Image: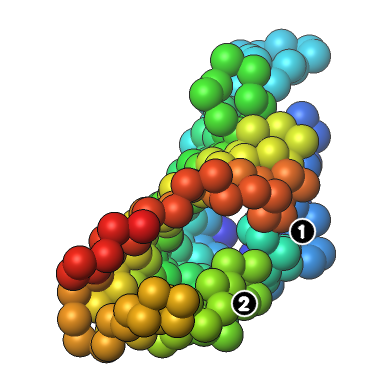
Amino acid sequence: TIAGPIPDALRLLDSPPLRYAQALGIEPGKAGGEASTRLSLKFPLLKTLRLDDLEILAQASVKSLSLPKVALGQDLDGGVLELTVDGKGLDAAGSVSLGGMPATLVLRENFSAKGAPFRSRYHLKAAAVTDEQRRRLGLDAGSFLTGPVAAYVSVTFGDGGRGDIEARLDLAPARLTLPGLGWTKEPGKPGTAEASIRLDRRQVATIPRFIVLSGDLEA
């Protein structure tokens, strides 16, 4: 077991021939936090080892994790996570703050998209996403939607920064307004929304689907 700053743990995982931090697109020096890491290595006694010859398993308990620009241009901080790394990728689960938004996170990162359905996938659940947090994420709905919403979000990336977001929102705490139709939903009344969002270069490109259900409104 190795305990210490996260950059040190990442440098260990990035040493030849592993290069795991590089495969995840993480620069060890830009990460912050503390980690307790358990590392297991199995390998044949060969003069020249290839990565495929190694059986590697690293398990880490991480506190105060910080990483810059992890999704939608936002920093991740305050992370308390359990991580598992093997020769194929990384799995993580715990609590984080993304762009100031507290959330629970389940993450899968594949070291290569070859033979895998995706490069990375995040499942985020947030109890309350505020107006300001939505603006920072590029998901501002203007005067149509004001106030906090609970959100369950799945973000999937392939190579090249292209990806998709699927979101389900609980609109009960929020206020919805359609001035042109003279329709308003006040906070406390039930409402839900679903959205599909396309990403390019890890930024919002288009929103091909956005459905709102609340009382007599279906839009």
In this rendered view, identify the residue nearer to me: 16 or 83: 83
Question: Which dot marks residue 28?
Answer: 1
Q: Residue at x 70, y 50 (%)?
A: 205
Q: Is residue 65 visible?
A: no
Q: Residue 185, located in which quarter of the rendered image?
A: bottom left
Which residue type does callout 1 highlight? Pro
Residue 50 seen from this side: yes
Q: How is the image coloured?
A: rainbow
Q: Is residue 35 left or right of residue 17?
A: left
Residue 180's place in the image compared with 73, above or below, is: below
Quarter assignment of residue 167: bottom left
Q: CA distance from mark 1 to mark 2?
A: 29 Å
Q: Is residue 112 left or right of residue 149?
A: right
Crowd class of label 2 (few under 14; some 14 to 19; many from 20; radius 10 Å): few
The amino acid marked with disc number 2 is: Arg
Quarter location, residue 132: bottom right
* Labelled disc at residue 135: 2
